[in-house]
Amino acid sequence: MHDPVLKPLSSDLPADPARRRLLAASAAGAALALPGAAALAQPREGVQVGPRSSFESLVPASEIEAEAARGYRDMLAQARARHLLAEPVHPQLRRLVYISTRLRPFAGMWNERAVGWQWEVNLIGSPQVNAFCMPGGKIAFFWGILTKLKLTDDEVAMVMGHEMTHALREHGRAQIGKEVATQGTISLLAGLFGWGMAGRQMAGVGGRLLTLKYSRDDETEADLIGLELAARAGYDPRSALSLWQKMAAASKGAPPAFLSDHPSSPDRLRTIAANIPRVQGLYDRAPKPDVRYGPPMTGGNSGKG
Ligand SMILES: [Zn+2]
């Protein structure tokens, strides 16, 4: 996620002592929270993942989602100014919207807030092999990932499920919460949200959320939950393997930015392969897509074709 299009935003939220106290209190409470509820849950059909990070409770989801929406709007405005934002009628954008619409009904299983999210999908005419979903369901695909990897619909669904999971499991929120905890002070958070004079000069969270690097555990979780979301939506789980094989092939020579955050290791493929049987039944029983698209007809660098 290193597109020059993406510039951090400065935030203009006002100082709010009451909110700071609230955050400090929730930070203290979070330190006492114990994981383990998931371990007591009934076995479920589908993938198995660990509990959510307790660090996410250090920052309010509503704030993170608002900042993400702001960062997303800013990125879209910059893309539009460069004539790099695909129009709604673009066939590849319609394809992305269709696939996202099939996955979205299952998002609430992983995060009840997602039911109320204003989901958005956009296609950016950048040659980068990249895609992301920001907190609150703000999705973007880059033209390069569709053309250079010639992604099938099933593979697009795997990428989308993976990126949606980063938002659903609030990996960005947890990471910012962890920074707050390790700094041991609320002042960093105040700075991140632009509270106070110093904060106004710092990059806003909305911009930061575009450049976060996720941990290996977050990546594994995104692979597995993404696999299940796509399978429930009627997309073939085996395509997760072909996707990462294509990624591996693309990484020879100059690795795309996406792969610096998402290395296509043998480990990754093994973990995905081991989890396909867990979602096979869900896929077999799922209604299949009634519309099928294909990769872009041209290999050009524009999302406007
Ligand atoms: Zn990822």
Image (spheres, rainbow, N blue to C red):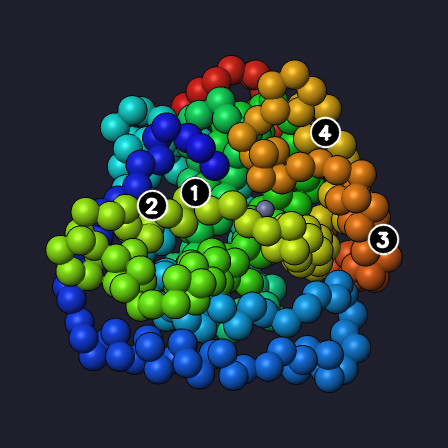
Quarter of the figure with the C terminus: top left
Q: Residue at x 40, y 49 (%)?
A: 209
Disc 3 element:
helix
How many numbered dots are placed on residues in this image?
A: 4
Query: In the rendered image, which residue does mark 1 sit on?
Result: 211
Query: In the rendered image, which residue does mark 3 sit on?
Result: 274
Position of residue 198 measured from the top left corner of the image (x, y, whole percent): 18, 53
Which is more foreground, mark 1 or mark 3? Answer: 1
Disc 3 or 4, which lies upstream in sequence? 4
Which is more foreground, mark 2 or mark 3? Answer: 2
Q: Residue at x 58, y 34 (%)?
A: 260
Q: Residue at x 80, y 50 (%)?
A: 271
Is label 1 in contact with label 3 (beta carbons under 8 Å)?
A: no
Is label 3 in contact with label 4 (beta carbons under 8 Å)?
A: no
Residue 115 or 26: which is nearer the viewer?
26
Disc 4 element:
helix
Which is more foreground, mark 4 or mark 1? Answer: 1
Query: In the rendered image, which residue does mark 4 sit on?
Result: 248
Is label 2 in contact with label 3 (beta carbons under 8 Å)?
A: no
Query: In the rendered image, which residue does mark 2 sit on?
Result: 207
